[in-house]
Image: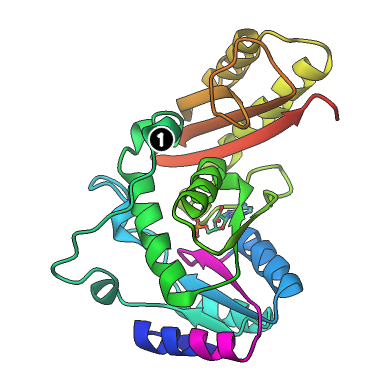
């Protein structure tokens, strides 16, 4: 496995892979790899001749008050994990190379996809995500790129961007990987102390209760949402950012639970903002 730190070298490797007629899968990450990332890498290994993992803590997707400075970073540890998973290349560019002094072009997703869920409290976030992914896609030129369903809004926005901007890349969504107690794995879980860590299980528990209600016939989305809110509000360390019950395809708010319903939430546990979701398929 090789760690590539310059854009030029990464481009040149990508060109060679292309001319060798090999397929390449990309797993974009901000590093501090965990089982969630590993599952994306495993899927990419299955599907492609070669796998590139990008590790870049992208400053343009963090608001000034967010955790850019404190975001956990450990390249050595990540490299070991990638080596074990037989990743071919880590692409780890420098911030100053990705965003040169006169950088001034951004890719902005449509408001219809960002005026809800995480886009409300993190208004510039998806602009940063789409911009950095456009750059990484252009530098790495993968045939496929792998994203977690944990970040369900990101996945939908990236799929739309790839279609709208004619990238020749298949976007592959991968299921959420969880801790034994149900908490979705996240690099941000490292911020939680032990009591917060226990409290954090409320996200999954409240979604499971909502699913039970729906399974036993509840069709009123407002009542389902109210039950989630009530359960989370009983947890003193938790503060709701949003709880949404949406049409999975359009992200429109629902009054009545329908065939494919997305339950999506962001909840602060202390200062740490955690997200989770579940897609409920009434045919299940
Ligand atoms: P991040 O490093 O947090 O930007 O995440 C990189 C990729 O890993 C994104 O596509 C995430 O959706 C995905 N990911 C993060 N956590 C999980 C998880 N628990 N299960 C599945 N995918 C995940």
Q: What are the residue bounds of the magenta stretch?
A: 14-33
- Residue visible at 85% across and 27% down in the picture: 283
149 is higher (above) or lower (below) than 211? below
- The answer to whether one can see residue 69 in this image is no
43 is higher (above) or lower (below) than 61? below
- Residue visible at 48% across and 76% down in the picture: 140
Side of 269 relative to 229 (left or right): left
| Residue 44 x %, y % | 68, 69
- Which residue lies under the disc numbered 1? 114
The picture quadrant where one finds residue 119 is top left
Q: Is residue 15 magenta?
A: yes
| Residue 223 x %, y % | 64, 8
- State ligand 1's quadrant: bottom right
Side of 97 relative to 142 (left or right): left
Q: Secondary structure at mark 1?
A: helix
- Residue visible at 65% across and 63% down in the picture: 40
Q: Residues within 10 Å of mark 1 (few under 14, many from 20)?
A: many
148 is higher (above) or lower (below) than 232? below
Q: 126 or 80: nearer the eye?
A: 126
The outermost residue toward the left is: 102
């Amino acid at each position: 496995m090789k760690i590539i730190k310059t854009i030029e070298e990464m481009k040149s490797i990508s060109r060679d892979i292309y001319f060798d007629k090999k397929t390449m899968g990309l797993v974009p990450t901000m590093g501090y790899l965990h089982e969630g990332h590993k599952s994306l890498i495993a899927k990419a290994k299955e599907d492609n001749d070669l796998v590139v993992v990008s590790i870049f803590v992208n400053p343009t997707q963090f608001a000034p008050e967010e955790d850019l400075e404190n975001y956990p970073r450990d390249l050595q540890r990540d490299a070991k994990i990638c080596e074990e998973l037989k990743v071919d290349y880590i692409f780890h560019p420098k911030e100053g190379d990705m965003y040169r002094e006169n950088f001034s072009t951004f890719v902005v997703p449509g408001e219809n996809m960002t005026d809800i869920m995480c886009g409300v409290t993190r208004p510039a976030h998806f602009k940063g995500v789409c911009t950095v992914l456009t750059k990484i896609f252009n530098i790495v030129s993968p045939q496929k790129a792998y994203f977690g369903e944990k970040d369900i809004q990101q996945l939908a926005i990236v799929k739309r961007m790839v279609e709208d901007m004619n990238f020749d890349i298949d976007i592959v969504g991968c299921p959420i990987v969880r801790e034994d107690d149900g908490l979705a794995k996240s690099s941000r879980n490292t911020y939680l102390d032990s009591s917060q860590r226990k409290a954090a299980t409320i996200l999954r528990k409240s979604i499971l209760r909502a699913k039970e209600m729906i399974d036993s016939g509840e069709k009123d989305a407002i009542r389902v949402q109210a039950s989630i809110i009530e359960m989370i509000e009983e947890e003193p360390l938790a503060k709701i950012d949003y709880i949404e019950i949406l049409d999975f395809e359009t992200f429109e708010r629902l009054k009545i639970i329908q065939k494919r319903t997305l339950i999506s939430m962001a909840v602060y546990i202390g200062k740490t903002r955690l997200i989770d979701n579940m897609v409920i398929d009434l045919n299940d």
